[in-house]
Amino acid sequence: MFIDEARIRVYAGGGGNGCMAFRREKFVPRGGPSGGDGGRGGDIVMESSERHNTLVHFRFNPEYKAQRGRHGEGSNCTGKDGEGIVLKVPVGTIVYDDVTGAVVHDFSRPDDRMIIARGGRGGRGNQHFATATHQAPQEHEAGRPGEERMLRLELKLLADVGLVGYPNVGKSTLISRISAARPKIADYEFTTLQPNLGVVTIGEMPDQESYVVADIPGLIEGAHEGHGLGVQFLRHIERTRLLVHLVDVSDASGRPDPVKDFEVIMAELSSFGAGLDEKPMIVAGAKIDVANKEKLAKLQKYCDKRGYPFIGISAVSGENINKLKWQVGAIVRQMRQGSYEGPKPKSLRLRGSEVAKPAVKKAVAKKAVAKKKVAKAPAKKAANQQKSANKRVSQSRRAQTARPSAGRKKATAARPKKKLSGKQRARR
């Protein structure tokens, strides 16, 4: 049984209570308080393990409680600490707080450990409250309760390559040809009911390389609304580096247009989010051993126009399977090294869907911002003009109220003095 989501409740252990005790022994002249501290409660620890690949063990046992610390005892004896619990989760598990929705931790590496609920601290005994003036204290502390949390676990498989496409296009057959995986294969839709992982090996020792391929159940139009198996398994290809999109180019599917098939699946990837429609992608025309040549040519022309690498394969006859393995391996190697500069597909609005490519959305947003700027430009210009006029008025007012300059004083001093009459001179 494959379980990739579970909810659990964890209870860390509470701390033990501090003890109130007094030491009274014969032939011991000095007694006094001797209450010990309580023990610490046990922690809930979560650890990623490569031995687990599902969350099924959490589905049937959703509550975990660590041991509480023992109470303190006399003769200054500290209580025993409670034992913690270690919960094993598969690599790729993300732990969310089910109340706030915040990410607690992402276990993306093996043997990664984290305390998700801490045990309570033990209370202090009365020995800690003794002073020179308070020699017989009766105070002691109760233990602190441990943390209690509701958590949601979500498993996202770690793979380098993800296979996507309509049901019954040959994804399970392909992964069985390129790896040792043996998924269920049948000639009806939705044969795959859970994701499958396969390790693909290319080259020979000592230059042998490998990468992991994830095969998820098929998608159909309206999967984001719950049609078919929905998009509940798309989370398993969120962390992939590359997508291989299989499109059936034979007449067995009953769908006349392979380009529409491609755009429908791209619309579902875009509706799911997480940037799946922006990941590097190789388009594989499946079942070319019985292909309709018109469909094959139409799909190849469409991919060349949009910038998607295209290759025709047949998982039954093995045609171009090795070529696909090496091509995918080369891209994965470059992406691991950070040197991949592959073709960037042109942005487009997907036909038959209201979901646009992110690049189109960004362009629309930029145009809206530009229009707002143009609309605000006249008002901004008028405000700047008014501000300049106010500034000139204030400068002129300051100039009028300012004291006469040195040049004006000099000009006043250079004027000829009036002659005074005799009476005026006598008065002075």
Image (cartoon, helix red, strand yellow):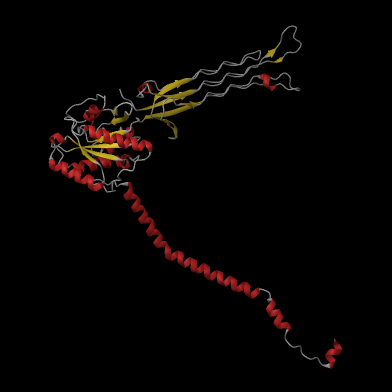
Q: Position of residue 220 (x, y in %)?
A: 23, 37
- Pick out the residue farthest to the right: 426
- Of residues 271 and 135, the one nearer the viewer is 271
Residue at left offset 56%, top offset 71%: 392
| Rendered image quadrant of residue 80 | top right
Left or right: where 318 falls relative to 89 = left
Tag count: 0
Q: Is residue 214 above or below residue 17?
A: below
- Of residues 295 and 19, the one nearer the viewer is 295
Q: Position of residue 118 (x, y in %)?
A: 51, 25
Q: Is residue 294 above or below residue 13?
A: below
Q: Is residue 312 above or below residue 422?
A: above
- Pick out the residue farthest to the bottom: 422
| Rendered image quadrant of residue 311 | top left
Left or right: where 291 falls relative to 35 = left
| Rendered image quadrant of residue 165 | top left
Q: Where does the C terminus fall, quadrant-wise?
A: bottom right
Residue at left offset 34%, top offset 35%: 333
Residue at left offset 73%, top offset 84%: 414
- Pick out the residue farthest to the top: 26
Q: Position of residue 335 (x, y in %)?
A: 35, 37
Q: Where does the N terminus fall, quadrant-wise?
A: top left
Q: Is residue 227 visible?
A: no
Q: Is residue 200 above or below residue 302?
A: above
Left or right: where 185 falls relative to 66 = left
Q: Position of residue 134 (x, y in %)?
A: 74, 22
- Pick out the residue farthest to the front: 206
Q: Is residue 383 visible?
A: yes
